[in-house]
Image: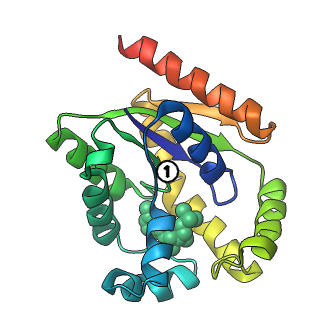
Amino acid sequence: MFILLFGPPGAGKGTQSTLLSERLKIPHVSTGEILRAAILGQSALGLQVEECIAAGRLVPDTLITDVVAERIGEPDCANGCILDGFPRTIPQADALDEVLTQRNSSIHAVIQLAVDMKELLERLSKRSEVELRSDDSPETIAGRLEIYEQETSPLIAYYEKRGQLRRIDGMAPVETVSQRIIEAIRDASKQSD
Ligand code: AMP
């Protein structure tokens, strides 16, 4: 089962993906985490993306698609995974379809976490104090939210048209959001039966 967790930076994708991964017993695949680990390990990939990430820009579509194709080809993803932070552009979504079709699989549900701008800014500014991420500085945060609007939010209509999008209020308490995600996934299962 491939589930996409979708929403702007600070919407709670990471937290909810972790909870969902425990519940569904499938891995949590966060492209941001994979890239940050590559930077930390100073691998060829890390060196390639370091500047882009620190500036809050998206890394190239072909590069991130290859990273995801490789990761979801690993044995622990045989039964699917939760994709957090991918796809982020229409070409990435098209590429994901191709990768999944090749393995006779498809997207089960796309969960959109909706959080208003004021709350996002508060969460991201709090996170910058705790996690010390290179891309959580005030200027970079504004840029990342803008990139989300321009490049990523068109995916809402993309998946809505396919009847796969489930919108969840990401402002509710963490446990409530988690429960609603589970219900949305169950609902998607009923529809695909
Ligand atoms: P995240 O942890 O998901 O907020 O991702 C952190 C950063 O990694 C983003 O701001 C991008 O620079 C990069 N990144 C993660 N996922 C993608 C993606 N699907 N496409 C392009 N860049 C990505």
Q: Quadrant of the N terminus?
A: top left
Q: Which residue is mark 1?
A: 154
For badge 1, the amino acid type reads Pro
Which residue lies at the image location 49% right of the left edge and 31% below the top edge? 24
Which residue lies at the image location 46% right of the left edge and 42% below the top edge? 4
Specify whether tag 1 is near ligand 1 (CB below 8 Å): no
The image quarter in which residue 86 lies: bottom left
Q: Is residue 129 above or below residue 77?
A: below
Q: Is residue 108 above or below residue 103?
A: above
Which residue lies at the image location 30% right of the left edge and 62% below the top edge? 65
Q: Residues within 10 Å of mark 1 (few under 14, many from 20)?
A: some
Q: Percent position (x, y) of residue 133?
A: 66, 77
In this rendering, position of residue 145 left or right of residue 100? right
Of residues 150 and 65, the one drawn nearer to the viewer in this rendering: 65
Of residues 36 and 117, the one drawn nearer to the viewer in this rendering: 36
Residue 58 visible to an observer of this rendering: no
In the rendered image, the residue lying farthest to the left is 102
Q: Is residue 83 above or below residue 66?
A: above
Mark 1 residue element: helix
